[in-house]
Image (cartoon, rainbow, N blue to C red):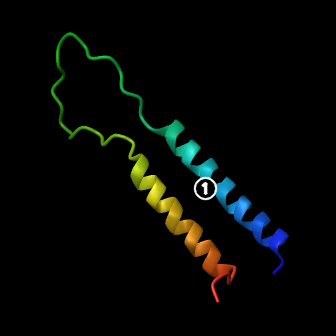
Amino acid sequence: MDKKKMSAALAAVAMVIKTREEALACSAPEISEPETQAPILTQPAAQPFNTWGISGRQTQMQANAMMQLRMFK
């Protein structure tokens, strides 16, 4: 595979991953300002958006894509 095709494929994979990350960030629940009275919570509080976890997942997906494109010989 020539270098132009390889770089185009990697750029496409990176763009898809970036788009999915942005979609995930937009769909994350927003934290509202606290009310005067604290409500009784029946469920545990939601975990905050984990940027490092997403970054690790992105690296795994990119390595998987490179293996599928047979870049490692």
Image location of residue 44, percent across then percent down: 20, 41
| Image vertical order of residue 44 relative to residue 7, above or below | above
Quarter of the image that includes the N terminus: bottom right
Q: Tell me if mark 1 has few (under 14), some (14-19) or many (20+) residues whose alpha carbon lies within 10 angstroms of its own.
A: some
Taking the spot 46% from the left edge, 53% from the top edge, the residue there is: 54
Residue 64, quarter of picture? bottom right
Q: Amino acid at mark 1?
A: Ile
Image coords of residue 20 (percent x, y)? 59, 50
Residue where numbered disc 1 is placed: 17
Observer-nearest residue: 36 or 42? 36
Q: Is residue 34 above or below residue 12?
A: above
Position of 37 with respect to 32 (left or right) is left
* Residue for point 25% across, 14% down: 35
Q: 13 or 42: nearer the eye?
A: 13
Badge 1 marks a residue whose secondary structure is helix
Image vertical order of residue 45 relative to residue 36, above or below:
below
Residue at screen point 40% across, 54% down: 53
How far from the left and from the top, in percent, is residue 28? Answer: 45, 38
Please identify the quadrant where the C terminus is shown.
Answer: bottom right
Expressed as whole percent of the image width and height from the top left, the position of residue 43 reads 21, 40
Q: Is residue 49 left or right of residue 69?
A: left
